[in-house]
């Protein structure tokens, strides 16, 4: 059922194949290359990203193959038979070094490094970008919803307006970012998530009366009844009928679990519904609210002290509104043992050359202080420079540090396999170490990320070399 | 390879199963039901929607099954064994009536009607909403890009930032909306689309010089060389090197097809690049531009008369920015032969009851004039009422009309199969009949959609019945 366990070779931009054929035919098939995955800005005008998609990526890379059908298709496109013969036995045998899934990361950081032959590192570009960009976007969105909802339960209801069947990855990422459960059966089945769901308006409408619809649902599911109370009139019909059924369940020795509000003013309705339930001795009945929720609406409901016990969040969560995409890129940082950079007239787009690592520095209280990007060959880091305004620097003396990146695939052999629960737990512990100022929705404080002396020197030399070549 | 040809039964919200089990256990398994798919507002602050996703939906419905693995999973969730036994042989045997894929449609119109048993019509809700909402969103976005680009070639480059593997549906929909080709190999293969792609910056960076990289690419692909000219310095390095290779190709009896600009000011760079190419006798070399394009940026480039021959459009196309989702819903309109509506304190959300059709009325010049929603039992339509401010009405006398909806699946048997080309062609011919005022990006003129006398009367009676039941 997991889409990524099938031949994933076609989830690719066509230029990866034309380039791969080019490398093959010019005799560079086994030239070593190193690529970095990084993003340039935080989505949602926020202050951080929750990195997600790694486990799906490793699954996709493990299954990156070309079967007879794919090869026949390539032949029909006019690709070279010698290259197609090479693809027949192609498998990714490269090495991937990455931060952990669930890590809190920041712009410019090379969070994933892919090393191998130029062909294998190039071919996986598109699926890597697709999965990491999307899942990191949604995990980050979910973490914001989690922040707003504090310790209230949050359920993903988004599949119906997700962007196609990729909704399964949205749900996976949402759980990593802090959502508790999902309505998405496919995602729950593929990833072992808690699934949730009761009834829609159509159930209510299909009976002659709302009360009959409620009674029948309680009869079929006496131990798990939530009732949707807004089909006709929430406070004059839905809640009174739910109370009637709640009392009937009590007489049968059962309990009504909750009611759901899916329209109208959720603050107003939840307060009145709560009062009506309490007045009937049903203070244990929970109130679930849904309808166009996101972190801002939930924050507003919390500020109004709306007595809502659980939130159902859909479209805006699974599509990552209002950002829609993380701007992650995959750039060549070394080729044939030599560091490479992409120059740009837009200086913020000049890439960082060489094989790099990320050092994270902590305050004495264990909170994140700053991150330093350095070459893998550097053993210690005493100072970091601002990546663009390089005269600005910060001393890291006295701050304990750790390396954030680990080998997750070694010459094609997968070394790690994180469950969604593992990654969600890790995200939670890491976000707890990020100061609240960086988590703020409005104008978050910018987390400090710098580059090492040695990396700065390498970049300067490559840029100077570029000017020498191009200034006439 | 087509994801929708596998068992698609799990692409569902869990409440569809709890409701289905409920219907089964209360003895309503074969009760007849009718659902409408409609949306409430046009995306992108636009004036219309291009309906897409129907062909994928029919494929998904044909393959809507539950295998042993799925049933075992449901058993683990505690669903009833009798219901699971029923699901074992479940197939959709209902009837689907729909407007054609590629049709121009408007808010409130019941563009798809699903009839069958309550269980089968309910179970397919989520995948129907997922595919129709997403593909219609992207087809509509693509049609806006097409309007801006006039007759210039437009290629989809979006897979790397699409929302997961659902990117294949985005590409399909983009072609229906008017995009010419795609970089997405999986979508091209699944749907028979034209695929396109040449090289990334990494190809250029992997050689010791840009000129060497260009030469090698031209050597491998002498008949299809496009050169990416912005890796180092577009006008001082990229274009001069492309001209050198263009002249070398001429000497070999070949032609350089084009150059691609992927950063910087595309108007400025394209004008200068064009002048440099022309001055070198390479006026046949085309200029392709990409980088964060959408309908607004393309319109601006066209207004500046930037000499760009083709546009590559990515993220903003395949994620449907800035709307991210079409707000389509699926509502019960009849049950057991009786019309049903969902009441709402938000009057714009009160649904239209009964089995309905859409009449489209034309002006004498063949352009669309107005649409009327009527009951299927009505033979003619002389007047339509505004769906909310019902005293306002329009006469349709003298306007020729046609019925927009057709049976596309009859008791489980699929009757139509539209290729992407068919649907794209149809969308083009239909959009040509929509007045330009409705296609305008800013404050488009609202197209007239009304309801028939008979439908209005049915709704009024049901609403009156509701008040009588709930006014105490």
Image (spheres, coloured by chain):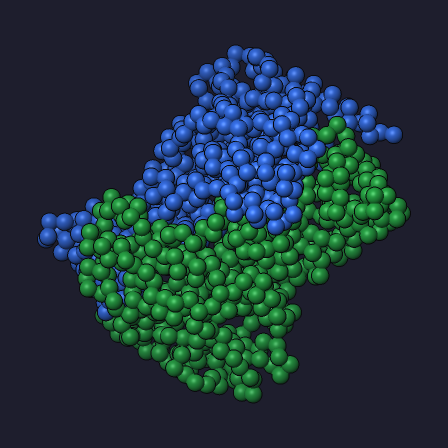
Chain colours: A blue, B green
At a point 47% along the width and 68% down the height, the residue shown is B416
User: For this view, does A31 lie left or right of residue A309?
Assistant: right
Above/below status of B175 relative to A208: above
User: For this view, does B362 lie left or right of residue B236?
Assistant: left
Above/below status of A182 relative to A265: above
Q: Position of residue A319 (x, y in %)?
A: 48, 48
Task: Indicate the quadrant containing the N terminus of chain A: top left, top right, bottom left or bottom right.
Answer: top left
Above/below status of A363 relative to A142: above
At a point 57% along the width and 26% down the height, the residue shown is A115
At a point 65% along the width and 52% down the height, the residue shown is B155
Residue A413 in view in this figure: yes
User: For this view, does A165 lie left or right of residue A154?
Assistant: right
- Could you say which quadrant of the image residue B342 lies in? bottom left
Residue B156 in view in this figure: no
Q: Give the mark count.
A: 0
Above/below status of A360 relative to B232: above
**Between A287 and B142, the one nearer to me in the picture:** B142
């Amino acid at each position: 059922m997991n889409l990524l366990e099938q031949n994933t070779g076609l989830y690719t931009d066509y230029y990866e194949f034309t380039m791969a054929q080019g490398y093959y035919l010019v005799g560079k098939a086994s030239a070593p290359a190193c690529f970095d995955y990084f993003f340039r800005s935080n989505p949602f005008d926020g202050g951080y990203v929750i990195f997600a998609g790694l486990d799906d990526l490793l699954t996709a890379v493990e299954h990156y193959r070309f079967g007879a059908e794919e090869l026949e298709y390539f032949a029909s496109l006019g690709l070279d038979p010698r290259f197609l013969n090479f693809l027949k036995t192609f498998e990714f045998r490269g090495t991937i070094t990455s931060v952990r899934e669930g890590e809190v990361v920041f712009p410019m950081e090379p969070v994933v490094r892919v090393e191998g032959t130029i062909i294998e590192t190039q071919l996986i570009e598109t699926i890597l970008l697709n999965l990491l960009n999307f899942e990191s976007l949604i995990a980050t969105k979910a973490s914001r919803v989690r922040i707003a909802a504090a310790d209230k339960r949050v359920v993903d209801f988004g599949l119906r307006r997700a962007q196609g069947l990729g909704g399964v990855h949205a749900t996976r990422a949402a759980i990593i970012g802090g959502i508790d459960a999902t309505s998405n059966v496919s995602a729950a089945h593929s990833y072992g998530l808690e699934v949730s769901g009761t009834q829609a308006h159509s159930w209510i409408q299909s009976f002659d009366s709302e009360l009959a619809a409620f009674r029948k649902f309680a009869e079929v599911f006496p131990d798990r009844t939530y009732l949707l109370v807004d089909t006709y009139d929430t406070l004059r019909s839905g809640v009174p009928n739910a109370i009637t059924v709640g009392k009937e369940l009590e007489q049968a020795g059962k309990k009504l679990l909750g009611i759901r509000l899916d329209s109208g003013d959720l603050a107003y309705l939840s307060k009145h519904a709560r009062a009506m339930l309490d007045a009937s001795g049903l203070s244990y009945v929970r109130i679930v609210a849904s309808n166009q929720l996101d972190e801002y609406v939930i924050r507003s409901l919390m500020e109004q002290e709306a007595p809502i016990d659980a939130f159902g969040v859909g479209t805006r969560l699974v599509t990552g509104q209002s950002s829609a995409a993380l701007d992650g890129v995959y750039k060549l940082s070394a080729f044939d043992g030599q560091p490479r950079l992409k120059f740009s007239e837009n200086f913020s787009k000049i890439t960082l050359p060489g094989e790099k690592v990320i050092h994270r520095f902590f305050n004495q209280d264990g909170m994140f202080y700053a991150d330093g990007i350095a070459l893998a060959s550097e053993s210690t880091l005493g100072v970091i420079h601002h990546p663009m305004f390089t005269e600005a620097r910060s001393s890291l003396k006295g701050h304990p540090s750790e390396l954030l990146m680990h080998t997750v695939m070694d010459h094609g052999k997968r070394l790690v396999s994180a469950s969604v629960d593992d990654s969600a737990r890790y995200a939670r512990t890491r976000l707890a170490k990020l100061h609240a100022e960086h988590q703020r929705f409005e104008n978050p404080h910018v987390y400090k990320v710098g580059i090492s002396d040695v990396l700065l020197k390498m970049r300067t030399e490559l840029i100077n070399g570029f000017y020498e070549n191009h200034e006439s």
